[in-house]
Image (cartoon, coloured by chain):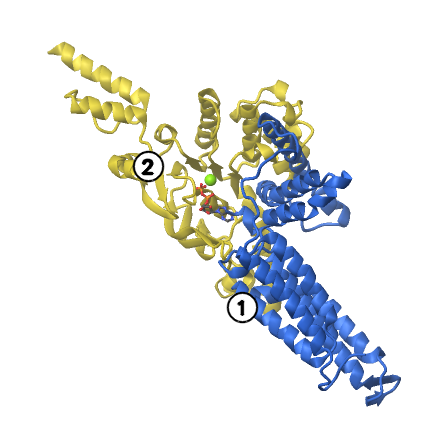
């Protein structure tokens, strides 16, 4: 199954993988809120522990999770530097030229780093690494279904999203195939001037569009042949069900958030104002 | 020496991920020059992967692919020691020799796809030009040939693949499936490759379309003396057109040899689920019933002449 490898989904057999995707979306939102609740050294320590626990529960290799942080390193470094140099406080650590570094600034920078880190890895482990794109769309459709009362075409959006997700790997594969076929005829995509390089994409783009359009027509035909007519009255193959373990997980997340708020009042080392 | 040599070649898709897939497992092969070699095997046995390795599109995860004895994926560091003493580099300084060797390697890499022409599986999706003529000319144009030469090659390729002059000015998108396939084939033949590699060139075509394609390939091979590799599912086509046959199964080479040698192990082929030619089976059951036909019959023509001989024998009795 090459298709599933699209996106970040990392197949494994873990508690988190098996949770109801709707609960996972809610938990992710809660977790994001939690990262912003933290204000003290103790609460951040617990937040870091929670990241470690989540990674362990999800059975995803640490190396894979850390990979998702890499593209954000520049942003993290940038906010870190800004925080260190532009915060003011009472406890002056160093002073040189026009810069003054305060202890508060250092703490704020560290907190900001931990917050972004927890945000990225937490949402990754809770949602994108452990949920297939298809489950994700199903869950979104289910969570947004109250909007149907306001005549928002939730089903259509969800169907469009799942078709798109379904065909991204297909189109990627197709692009690769077409590129290979044209390379076999001596096409060169990497050298020459900008205009030449743009021109060299024509032998890829035209076959790609042709096949994408044909594919869309075929798909529409195939759906109509099976009497597809929108979401009304349609039943599902995989019905999402909320089990006790899902409720427990959600409650744990709420307890975790409340706990973090209480830890903010522990006056240990440093508490953000 | 063999034209193409695969030396302990392995290929792994998505190495280091949970989707890891070994497509080729320690393949050692020699492919004779100047004849047609058929490659047969089940879907997923690694045939396409092996074919894409021959023109450098896929690089072996382990092992080497040699064309005329030269490792097509060699880097400057690989060959430096060996080439340094050649007359054209010996007189140069180290730095200049490095540069010259690097340039030579780059040139060989760029020229590889013109020497080894690859027609991919279902190649009709590669068509993109406004006219059939221009599409066939895409390869030769990339070679940097003159307009005159391009024209000559396109017309020659059209003859090989039986594309009529009236089709050359049409849009390739207006053609039938079989015609598109032939245009795609012509697009590669027009580069006059010394090795022509075809991945299931006749898949999904009707019998007439099949023989157009295969006859064109055979004509090309006979006229140019080039080396041809054909991947196919059909034992019938293998029997009719190929000199050598390679049988692949589960990322490995199961058997390799001349057509006769390979087809002599009919039971083994049948066990891997491959079909032996229908006519061979008919002849085998005739022999079981006491008709004295020879064993090695793979095409209908051979069967006809063998049966004629049998009847003539009986007539003289
Ligand atoms: N792009 C790819 N990514 C991952 N696995 C692949 C890819 N292409 C082929 N494979 C796998 O490699 C094996 C050999 O494939 P292939 O060479 O296409 O076989 P064949 O041409 O004999 O049908 C198969 O198991 C296939 O699933
Ligand atoms: Mg194949």
Give the yellow chain's letter.
B
Which SS class for mark 2? loop
Tell me where residue B108 appears, x and y as whole percent: 56, 51
Tell me the CA gap for discs 1 and 2. 45 Å
A84 and B15: which is toward the camera: A84
User: In x, y percent, where is residue B103?
Assistant: 61, 57
Closer-to-camera residue (A47/A144):
A144
| Chain of the residue on which disc 1 is drawn | A
Residue under the point 35% across and 34% down: B243
The residue singled out by tag 1 in the image is A56
User: Is the residue marked by circle 2 packed among few (<14), some (14-19), or many (20+) residues within 10 Å?
Assistant: few
Q: Which mark is residue B273?
A: 2
Locate the C terminus of chain B by quadrant: top left
Q: Is residue A69 above or below residue A193?
A: below
Q: Residue B101 shows which numbered tag?
A: none
Residue extending farthest to the right is A98
Say whether residue A71 is visible.
Answer: no
Q: Position of residue A138 (x, y in %)?
A: 62, 46
Q: Residue furthest top?
A: B315
What is the x, y in percent for residue A135? 59, 48
Question: In which quadrant of the rendered view does residue A244 lie?
Answer: bottom right
Question: Do the residues under discs 1 and 2 have CB atoms within 8 angstroms?
Answer: no
- From the viewer's perspective, tell me whether residue B184 is left or right of residue A93: left
- Residue at figure coordinates x 36%, y 48% from the top left: B252
Q: Is circle 1 on the same chain as circle 2?
A: no
In this view, A154 is above or below B236? below
Per the rendering, the colour in which chain A appears is: blue
């Amino acid at each position: 199954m090459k298709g599933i490898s699209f996106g970040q989904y990392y197949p494994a057999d873990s508690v988190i993988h098996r949770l109801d995707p709707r609960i996972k979306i809610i938990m992710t939102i809660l977790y994001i809120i939690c990262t912003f609740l933290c204000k003290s050294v103790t609460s951040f320590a617990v937040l870091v522990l929670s990241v470690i626990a989540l990674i362990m529960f999800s059975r995803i290799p640490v190396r894979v999770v850390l990979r998702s942080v890499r593209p954000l390193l520049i942003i993290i470094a940038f906010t870190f530097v800004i925080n260190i140099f532009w915060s003011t406080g009472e406890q002056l650590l160093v002073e040189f030229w026009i810069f003054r570094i305060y202890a508060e600034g250092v703490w704020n920078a560290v907190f900001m780093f931990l917050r972004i880190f927890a945000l990225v890895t937490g949402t990754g482990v809770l949602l994108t690494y452990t949920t297939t794109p298809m489950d994700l769309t199903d869950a979104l459709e289910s969570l947004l279904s109250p909007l149907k009362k306001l005549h928002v075409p939730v089903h259509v959006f969800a169907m469009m999203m799942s078709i798109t997700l379904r065909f991204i790997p297909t189109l990627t594969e197709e692009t690769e195939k077409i590129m290979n076929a044209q390379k076999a005829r001596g096409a060169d995509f990497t050298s020459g001037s900008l205009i030449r390089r743009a021109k060299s994409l024509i032998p890829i783009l035209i076959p790609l569009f042709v096949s994408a359009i044909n594919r869309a027509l075929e798909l529409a035909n195939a759906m109509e042949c099976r009497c597809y007519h929108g979401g009304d009255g349609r039943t599902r193959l995989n019905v999402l069900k909320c089990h006790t373990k899902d409720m427990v997980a959600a409650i744990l997340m709420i307890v975790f958030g409340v706990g973090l708020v209480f830890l903010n009042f522990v006056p240990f080392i440093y508490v953000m104002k | 020496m063999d034209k193409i040599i695969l030396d302990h070649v392995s290929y792994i898709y998505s190495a280091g991920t949970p989707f890891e897939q070994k497509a080729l497992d320690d393949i050692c092969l020699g492919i004779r020059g100047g004849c047609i070699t058929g490659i047969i095997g089940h879907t997923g046995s690694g045939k396409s992967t092996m074919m894409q390795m021959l023109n450098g599109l896929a690089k072996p995860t382990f092992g080497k692919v040699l064309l005329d004895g030269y490792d097509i994926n060699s880097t400057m560091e690989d060959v430096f020691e060996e080439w340094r003493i050649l007359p054209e580099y010996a007189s140069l300084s180290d730095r200049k020799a490095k540069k010259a060797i690097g340039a030579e390697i780059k040139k060989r890499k760029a020229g590889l796809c013109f020497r080894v022409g690859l027609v991919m599986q279902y190649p009709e999706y590669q068509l993109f030009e406004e006219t059939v003529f221009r599409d066939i000319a895409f390869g030769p144009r990339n070679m940097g040939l003159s307009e005159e030469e391009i024209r000559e090659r396109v017309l020659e390729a059209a003859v090989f693949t039986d594309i009529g002059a009236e089709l050359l000015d049409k849009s390739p998108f207006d053609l039938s499936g079989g015609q598109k396939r032939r245009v795609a084939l012509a697009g590669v033949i027009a580069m006059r490759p010394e090795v022509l590699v075809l991945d299931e060139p006749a898949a999904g075509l009707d019998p007439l379309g099949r023989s157009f394609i295969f006859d064109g390939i055979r004509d090309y091979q006979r006229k140019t003396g080039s080396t041809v590799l054909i991947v196919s599912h059909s034992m019938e086509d293998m029997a009719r057109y190929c000199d050598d046959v390679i049988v692949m199964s589960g990322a490995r080479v199961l058997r390799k040899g001349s057509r006769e040698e390979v087809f002599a192990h009919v039971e083994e082929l049948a066990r891997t689920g491959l079909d032996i030619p229908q006519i061979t089976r008919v002849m085998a059951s005739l022999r079981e019933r006491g008709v004295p036909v020879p064993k090695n019959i793979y095409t209908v023509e051979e069967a006809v002449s063998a049966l004629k001989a049998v009847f003539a024998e009986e007539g003289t009795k």
